[in-house]
Structure formats: structure tokens, C-alpha cells
Image (cartoon, rainbow, N blue to C red):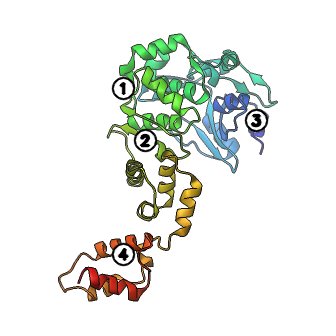
Amino acid sequence: MDILDYLKKLEDNGYEAYIVGGYVRDKLLNIESSDIDITTNAKPKEVSNIFDTKAKDNLGVINIKTDKYNIDITTFRKESHYIGHKPKKLAYVKDLKTDLLRRDFTINTICLNSKGDIIDLLNGQKDLEKKIIKSVLKPSKKFKEDPLRMLRALRFAIVYNFKINDEELIFILNNKKLFNNISYDRKKQEIGKILISNNVINGLMLLKTLGLTEVLEIDYDKIVKVNDLIGMWAQIDFSDNYSFTKLEKERISNIREIVASKRVDKLTIFKYGYYDSFIASQILKISKETIAKLNSEMVLHSKDELDIDSLEIKKLMPEDFIEIDKVKEKLVEEILEGKLSNKKGILKKYIIKNWK
């Protein structure tokens, strides 16, 4: 189904339906998007019956995934009693405008109907053309009920290279303490979107100039744009309150260690792996051709490729010798530096000469 067909199907069943928010905004900016938000006056149960699917949460959001789109369908609603970043109370309403007034910024209220026509009840298209991030209602209301919107305003301004409306910006600067009410998971998501944007350099500079890096508990000295989110996080200091997986922490540590060494050689690639070495090399301004050449010239990529195993090494050593891994590390180093051939007889002679 084409995306407009979902609207037509709801209309064929007697309901209003519009695509709203990010997809329409990005379409007008000539940016491709696969996340679709549809708003309708059909109740969740009715939507569920029409598309033969169930709500994905207690707020009655119907989710449909296709090869091309991730679609969320919600009923026209009015929200209240925000806790964290989610409303805890909602009431279904009959008109589109009331639904649009619950949203964050005017540029996210532009709608598309089933004919492909733009429906713009809150002048969002005008603000989009002026490249302005403007709150749907007073920022004192919108930002207090959900402080995450302050960070989203900054993120939209940075990613799209827009300007935050004066009233909204003044509120943000005068109410920095509200950032403390945003969960670290949500802050991490928004900062992550800034870090992978094409405007990240200017964006981080903006956050620092506005004195917001401190309240976000991040800091940085120099940033080099790389197309890897972990590679970007590795270049900034951040609070331990930000949660990363074990693998993410390992990769951040790897990249930081390589960058601190200011070099990438065969031993680097062997120890940290090609990908993290490649990301670190970008930060160090080492060409990808150089790294690819080093990798192609490596005769070893794992200790398992040594032409002598742990048991064979142990037989050459005194009975109480336990530092087998250190022996292997030295063999790898000598081989990668071209000082030793990876042949069992040669390796045995080297071990006997240097350890026995």
C-alpha cells in the first residue's frame, strides 16, 4: 500500500485521517523519511479492526510496520498530567485542530490529506519557510509540561540549521534547571541525533555558547565529524549517568585509546579491530587508504592464526610458567612488525632463545 492508501482506507470506513508531523515536515524539506504518524477521529478499537492489528501501548497507538514504513496511528486527542515525557491522561476529541494544539512545535503540525494536499491550521509551513522553531502554545506551558521539548527544540535547530524563536530561547536559557527533569535515556537519544547530524560541529558550539553543555553534563575540546555514533560519543566527555551497553563502552574506550596514542599501525588494528581503528583514524585525519593498506598487509588478525598453540608453547617452558598469553602477544608483535615469520620452527626457536 502507498502511504496515502492508509488514509483512504480510514476514509472509506467513514473517518477523517491525516499524516502529520515529521514525515510532512521532512517531505517539505526534501528529506526522505520512513516514520509515519497518522492522526484520525477513529477510535483505537476501530482503527484496530480496520487494519486487523492491536494497540502497542496504553495510549492507544496502533503500529503498522511495512517494508517501507513504520506507521503509528493515533486518535485525535487532548493530553494532560505529564509525568516524565509522557502524558498520563488523555481524552479523545472530535476535531483535528485540538489534536494539533497538543503537539510541540508548529513545524510538526503540518498535515497531509489523502489527496496529497497540505493542511496547515497553525501556520507551521510559514515557520518552516522562515526556518524558525516555534512552540505551538506558550513555551512556559509546553516546556514545563514536558521539558524534553526544550532539548528537542535545540536538536531541531541544530539538525536543520534553523533558529529557535526568541521567546522559546529565552525561556530555555532562564529555565536550565528543567533539563534535570529529563531522563538520561531521553537526553542520550536527543544528543545522539545531534552528534550524527551534518551540523554537529556548529551544534555543539551552540550548546557550549548557550551554557547548556554543563547542564547536559557533556563537554568537549575538539570534534571531528565521523559517520559513526559511538565514534562521536568517544570524542566528548559525558556523565557516568548516561547509560551505554558493555559493547558501546568497550568501543568508546578503544577509540579513545587509539586517538590518545596518535597513531594507527598493524598492532593497533590487531588489538582493537579494523572498524574501531578505522573510526579512530578518521578522527586522527589518517586516510582510509592508509588503513586499508595496513590491514591488507597483516599476516595475522588473531592469536589463533599463530602457527603454534598454547599447549606447544607450554611444553617449551618450565612447568610453573603461566604467562602464555604474554608470549603470544610478543610473537604477534614481532610478526606484525616483520621481524619474525609465522612458522612453527622459527617461533619455537624464538621462544627458547627469549624465555627458556
> Image quarter for residue 44?
top right
Distance between the alpha carbons at the discs numbered 1 and 4: 49 Å
Of the residues tagged 1 and 2, which is closer to the observer? 2
Depth order, front residue of 220/350: 350
| Amino acid type of the residue that numbered disc 2 sits on in the rendered structure | Gln
List x then y, in percent, for residue 309: 37, 83
Is tag 2's residue or tag 3's residue first in the polypeptide sequence?
Answer: 3
Depicted 179 relative to depicted 320: above or below: above
Q: Secondary structure at mark 4?
A: helix
Residue at image location 70% in from the left, 25% down from the top: 111
Residue 331: numbered disc:
4
Distance between the alpha carbons at the discs numbered 1 and 2: 18 Å
Q: Residues within 10 Å of mark 3 (few under 14, many from 20)?
A: few
Residue at image location 47% in from the left, 50% down from the top: 280
Is tag 1's residue or tag 2's residue first in the polypeptide sequence?
Answer: 1
Depth order, front residue of 323/97: 323
Residue 13: numbered disc:
3
Q: Residues within 10 Å of mark 4 (few under 14, many from 20)?
A: many
| Amino acid type of the residue that numbered disc 4 sits on in the rendered structure | Leu
- The residue that disc 2 covers is 235
- The residue that disc 1 covers is 215
Q: Secondary structure at mark 2?
A: loop
Is tag 4's residue or tag 2's residue first in the polypeptide sequence?
Answer: 2
| Amino acid type of the residue that numbered disc 1 sits on in the rendered structure | Val
Of the residues tagged 3 and 4, which is closer to the observer? 4
List x then y, in percent, for residue 220: 40, 34
Depicted 128 relative to depicted 297: above or below: above
Q: Residues within 10 Å of mark 2 (few under 14, many from 20)?
A: many
Tell whether label 2 touches label 4 (CB within 8 Å): no
